[in-house]
Amino acid sequence: MFEEFRSFFKQLGPGLVTGASDDDPAGIATYSQAGAQFGMGPLWLTLISLPGMLAVQEMCARIAIVTQKGLIENIRTIFPTWFVWMIVGLLAIANTFNIGADLGMMAASAQLVIPLPFWQWLILLSTVTILLQIFISYARYARYLKWLTLSLLAYILVAVAVQIDWMNALHHTFWPTIIWSREFLFIVIAFLGTTISPYLYVWQANSEVEDGRFLPSHLKHRRSLGLQERLRASFIDVVCGMGLSNVVAWFIMLTGASVLHTRGITQIDTADQAARMLAPLAGQFTSLVFALGIIGTGLLAVPVLSSVIAYAACEALDIKEGLSKKWFQAKCFYTIIVVSTMIGIFINVLQLSPVRLLLYSAVGNAIIAPPLLFAIFRLANDRKRLKNQMGTAWIRVVGFTTLLVMTVASVLGIWLVVTS
């Protein structure tokens, strides 16, 4: 049984890492807040987001595999320059705030494990993420990211360790509960923005391109696959990654609802705060596992966030660089990674409210999602560009529906922020 799982796990790649990186510390904070504030009411959101995530990420993977170009590089060939740089600029701003929030939560969570000063942990963890990207070969780095996805199992373990009304949880999952309030609407929009996040689109596409140029040893079997077979393998990969992402989000909300909401704790500002609150309510072990999960997901997500900025900027400038190249071969690419991470550290020096950081990131994602999804949908339906490999009808229908939903969510989200 274990050998079968190990063999299957070895076949997975970009889709799994993309899905796992979606559950970053900022996402964990959002899911924890949803469960703490509204109990099991928001659990059904995972069933709504999963089809949209599958459709969008499948289109991104398909575009990259067929064209062997990154997402921004493809967009640059058919859209005006101002549109491309608007996408890149908004992506950089949103991701940088997200990096700052993630690094801060990782450092605060690490303090729960080993009580060193916050700034020491912040510098140490930031340095580790930078060095891994610069000095580790792509083959080893891809394996490192994939094994880090197992850190998400911590949140399933936490849920199993606490007392949960499973029948009630299943009821709220399959029977939507809608609360007509401004606060619930904001949680729904924050959930969609966090789950169907723009940086995932770029990372998925560029990971597929990198694997096509320089396949890690455990994925070299894909070299012998034809286009159709590789697309099918990629789809299975995407299904596993997006499925894992939503299952973990469900368990995090469930933990917040069962442990925090039931005890009258309805306000969670950061993921590490959720870990602290779990200690007296669900035991020190539960709190420790939750904190370790935050550190693990942060070590996975921060490199993804900074790399996405670098990929987007370099492709907009028509520079062929990426993680598969050594640092001296891709100086611009790695400089952007270092600078974006350093800005993330500086954001924590400003001591901005974690909630405000998440708000800035959410607003950025809300603004960028619709135009980027529009560009993806247009590329995915370009018969000539994709050599008639346009995917199934349900992918296109769900993809277009996701574009409409995210556009409405973005408008409402910006309105809620402006009028708050």
Image (tube, rainbow, N blue to C red):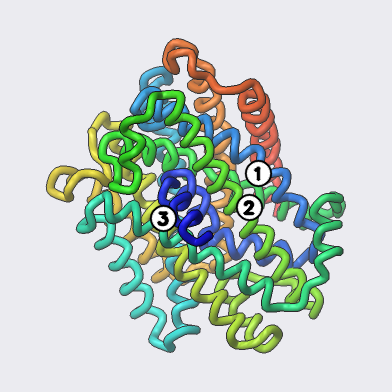
| First of labels 1, 3 by sequence position | 1
Residue type, mark 3 in image: Lys
Q: Are marks 1 and 2 in contact (CB under 8 Å)?
A: yes
**Residue 350 x %, y %:** 42, 69
Quadrant the C terminus occupies? bottom right
Q: Identify the residue under disc 2.
A: 246
- Circles 1 and 3: CB atoms closer than 8 Å: no
Mark 1 lies on residue: 50
Q: Amino acid at mark 1?
A: Leu
Of 25 and 352, nearer the camera is 25
For the image, the number of numbered tags is 3
User: Callout 2: 10 Å neighbours few (<14), some, many (20+)?
Assistant: many
**Looking at the rendered structure, which numbered label has been put on residue 392?**
none
Density class for disc 1 (Cα within 10 Å; few <14, some 14-19, many ≥20) is some
Q: Amino acid at mark 2?
A: Asn
Query: Which of disc 2 and disc 1 is earlier in sequence?
Result: 1
**Residue 349 in sight here:** yes
Picture quadrant where residue 54 is located: top right
- Residue 312 visible in this rendered orientation of the protein: no
Which residue is situated farthest in the left direction here? Answer: 328
Give the CA distance from mark 1 to mark 3.
20 Å
Look at 46% across and 29% down and name the residue there. Answer: 231
Q: Nearer the viewer, mark 1 or mark 3?
A: 3
Q: Secondary structure at mark 3?
A: helix
Residue 417's spot in the image, x, y percent? 66, 51
State the separation of the CA atoms marked 1 and 2.
Answer: 7 Å
- The residue depicted at 37 percent of the width and 41 percent of the height is 207
Q: Residue furthest top?
A: 384
The residue to which callout 3 is attached is 146
